[in-house]
C-alpha cells in the first residue's frame, strides 16, 4: 500500500506539471521598429509671404542742352537721386523633387511662381539753372516673380530638415520716373537742336518737365535657406528666407513739352537692382 500511494503521488505530480506550465505567462516577441520616414519623392504646394528692401533711383542730364554748364559748375539740369522703400505681400505655388541619399542628407530641386505687390516710391529735389525748383519722383513695382533652385538639406531628426537653397530668379518689374516743376515757377530752354518747357501753374506748358516708364521681364539670381518639417507622411510645412535680385535698369525721360522744330531734351533714369528680401511660409503635399 505504501508503494502504491507513492506511485499515485508521483503520477499526479507528473500529470500536473504541464498544467502549471500552461498557466505561466508567455513573453510576447519584441515589436518591430517604427518605419523611417523618407523625404524622397515629388511634391506640390502653395506659399505666401512678405518682401522688402530699399532701392536707389536717380536721374542725370543726357543731351547737350541739359548738360550745358551753368555758373558754379552746375549743369542746366542737375543730377538727383532718391531711395525707394519697396515692400509688400506675395503668394503663389511651388513644385519639386527630393532625394534622400542617406540617413542625414537630402538633395532636391524646386521651382515656384508668385504674384506680388512689392512696390515703393521716393522723391528728391532737382536743381535747374542752379535753383531747386523741380522734383524727381520715381517708383518701382514687382508684379510677379519666380525661382528655380537647387536645395541641400540636413536632417537633425527624421521628420525635420534644415536646408540651403540657390538658383535663378525671374520676374516682371514696372518702373516710372518724372521731373515736375514746383508751383509758381516756369522753365524752358533750347539749344543744340534740343528744347524743353514746363510751368506751374500752366501758362505755356504743363507742370511735368520730363517723364518716362518701362515694364521689363528680367532674369537674375536668388539664394537663401529655411526649415521644413513633416507633419504626416504626405504633408510638410516650411519657413524660408530668400534674397531675390532681378537686376538694374536704365531708360530715357524725354521732355513732355517741346517747341516745334526741336528734339525733346532728355534725362536718363537709372534704377538700382530690383532686389528684395523675402520671408514666406509654405505647405507641400508629397506623393
Image: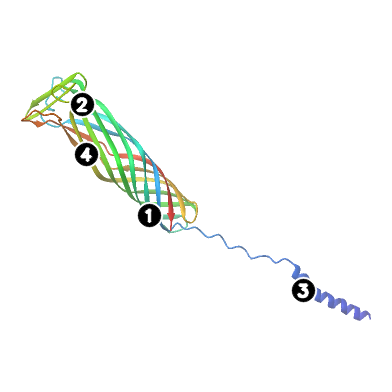
At 45% from the left edge and 49% from the top edge, which residue is drawn? Answer: 237
Instruction: Read off the residue under disc 2.
Output: 180
Q: Which mark is residue 18?
A: 3
Tell me which corner region of the image, top left, top right, bottom left or bottom right, holds residue 194: top left
Q: Earlier in the sequence, mark 2 or mark 1?
A: 1
Q: Earlier in the sequence, mark 4 or mark 2?
A: 2
Instruction: Read off the residue under disc 4.
Output: 214
Tag 1, which secondary structure? Answer: strand
From mark 2 to mark 3, how far is it between C-alphas? 107 Å
User: Would residue 208 be visible to someone looking at this image?
Assistant: yes
Quarter that holds the C terminus = bottom left
Please state which of residues 269 and 243 is positioned toward the viewer in this rendering. 269
Instruction: Read off the residue under disc 1.
Output: 96
Tag 4, which secondary structure? Answer: strand
* Disc 1: CA contacts within 10 A as few (<14), some (14-19) or many (>=20): many
Figure check: 123 above or below 142: above
Q: Where residue 58 appears, x then y in whole percent?
A: 23, 31
**Of the residues tagged 3 and 4, which is closer to the observer?**
4
Figure check: 171 above or below 123: below
Amino acid at each position: 500500500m505504501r508503494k502504491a500511494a507513492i506511485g499515485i503521488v508521483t503520477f499526479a505530480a507528473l500529470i500536473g506539471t504541464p498544467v502549471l506550465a500552461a498557466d505561466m505567462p508567455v513573453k510576447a516577441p519584441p515589436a518591430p521598429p517604427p518605419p523611417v520616414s523618407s523625404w524622397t519623392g515629388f511634391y506640390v504646394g502653395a506659399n505666401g509671404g512678405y518682401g522688402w528692401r530699399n532701392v536707389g533711383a536717380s536721374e542725370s542730364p543726357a543731351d547737350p542742352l541739359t548738360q550745358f554748364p551753368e555758373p558754379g559748375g552746375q549743369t542746366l539740369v542737375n543730377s538727383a537721386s532718391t531711395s525707394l522703400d519697396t515692400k509688400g505681400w506675395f503668394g503663389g505655388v511651388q513644385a519639386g523633387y527630393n532625394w534622400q541619399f542617406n540617413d542625414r542628407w537630402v538633395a532636391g530641386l524646386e521651382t515656384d511662381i508668385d504674384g506680388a505687390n512689392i512696390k515703393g516710391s521716393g522723391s528728391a529735389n532737382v536743381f535747374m539753372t542752379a535753383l531747386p525748383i523741380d522734383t524727381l519722383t520715381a517708383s518701382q513695382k514687382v508684379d510677379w516673380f519666380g525661382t528655380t533652385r537647387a536645395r541641400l538639406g540636413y536632417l537633425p531628426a527624421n521628420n525635420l530638415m534644415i536646408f540651403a537653397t540657390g538658383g535663378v530668379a525671374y520676374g516682371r518689374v514696372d518702373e516710372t520716373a518724372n521731373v515736375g516743376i514746383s508751383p509758381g515757377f516756369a522753365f524752358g530752354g533750347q539749344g543744340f537742336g534740343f528744347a524743353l518747357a514746363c510751368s506751374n501753374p500752366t501758362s505755356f506748358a504743363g507742370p511735368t518737365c520730363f517723364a518716362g516708364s518701362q515694364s521689363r521681364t528680367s532674369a537674375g539670381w536668388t539664394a537663401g535657406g529655411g526649415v521644413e518639417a513633416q507633419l504626416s507622411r504626405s504633408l510638410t510645412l516650411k519657413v524660408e528666407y530668400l534674397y531675390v535680385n532681378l537686376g538694374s535698369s536704365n531708360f530715357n525721360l524725354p521732355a513732355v513739352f517741346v517747341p516745334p522744330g526741336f528734339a525733346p531734351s532728355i534725362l536718363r533714369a537709372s534704377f538700382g537692382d530690383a532686389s528684395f528680401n523675402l520671408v514666406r511660409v509654405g505647405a507641400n503635399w508629397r506623393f
